[in-house]
Amino acid sequence: MGHEGENWFSLTLAGFRAAQVGHVGRARALWAEAERVAAGAFPGMPVHAVALTNLAAVTVCEVERDATHPSSAAWQAIRERAASEEMRLPARSSAFHLRLASRHADPFARFLRHRALSLAERGRWLAQANAFTRAGAPETLHRHLACEDAALAPMPRLLDAAVRAVRAGTLDRGGARDVLAAQVEDIATAGPPFGAPAPLGAQLEACLAFCAFAPLIDLICPQTEPDT
């Protein structure tokens, strides 16, 4: 991803580490800077949508049920891009898969497009969950978390566990700390996600695990509490 990508990654990871210990104001500042970097270097790319999603997790907003939040709009733009642009095979695929794709180009392109669309839709779902949390719309959030549309791609393991626990009302502050600590470790181990010129689908696959989840952060440090 180059220097800008490394900078985005460092700011994003530092924001997660700040949220992990309850320093929401620090996380907000770091994720705002990550968004500024992404907007300049990666406009319209998944890393920018992730930056907006993370910022939405720690920024109070006013949003009605059907309103479009900037983070949600960013994922929708990626979804529209996935619906129209050429689907390329990821460079890491084997020679076997390259031969297979060349013999079955149209079905394979449809598979890649469907996967990219479902990943973008999952990103938008997470962004909306964050916006509803920060807007103080618990009933809307509850309905949103209960929705499992078939068009949504599976969530990364830790986010899925967090959403299921929040939905069931079984996640407490200690559990939230454990989940977020594990997510921080996963992000640090993974390193920077793919950027241009990686195919859109590969970027989306790598980026979803970098999304913050506002209800998780709230359990660690409710937004009504001062940063300490």
Image: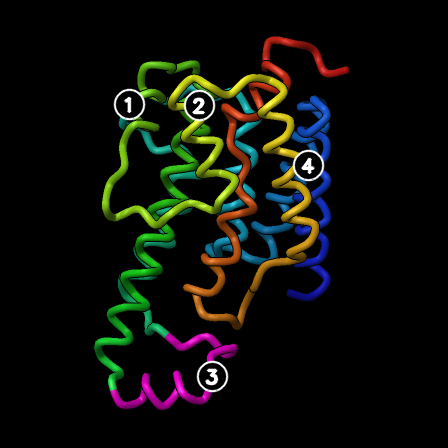
Is 149 part of what is drawn in magenta? no
Q: Amino acid at mark 2?
A: Val
> Sequence order check: which comes first, mark 4 or mark 2?
4
Q: Amino acid at mark 4?
A: Gly
> Sequence order check: which comes first, mark 2 or mark 1?
1
Mark 4, other Cα within 10 Å: few <14 / some 14–19 / many ≥20: many
Which of these two is toward me, 45 or 171?
A: 171
The residue carrying mark 2 is 166
The reply, left or right, for residue 126 in relation to residue 184 is: left
Q: Nearer the viewer, mark 3 or mark 1?
A: 3
Which of the 4 quarters of the picture holds residue 163?
Answer: top left
Q: Position of residue 212 (x, y in %)?
A: 55, 36
The residue carrying mark 1 is 143
Which of the 4 quarters of the picture holds residue 136?
Answer: top left
The residue carrying mark 3 is 94
Q: Which residues are magenta?
A: 88-103
55 relative to 89, above or below = above
Local SS, label 3:
loop
The reply, left or right, for residue 166 in relation to residue 27 is: left
Q: Residue at x 45, y 89 (%)?
A: 95
Which of these two is toward me, 113 or 185?
A: 185
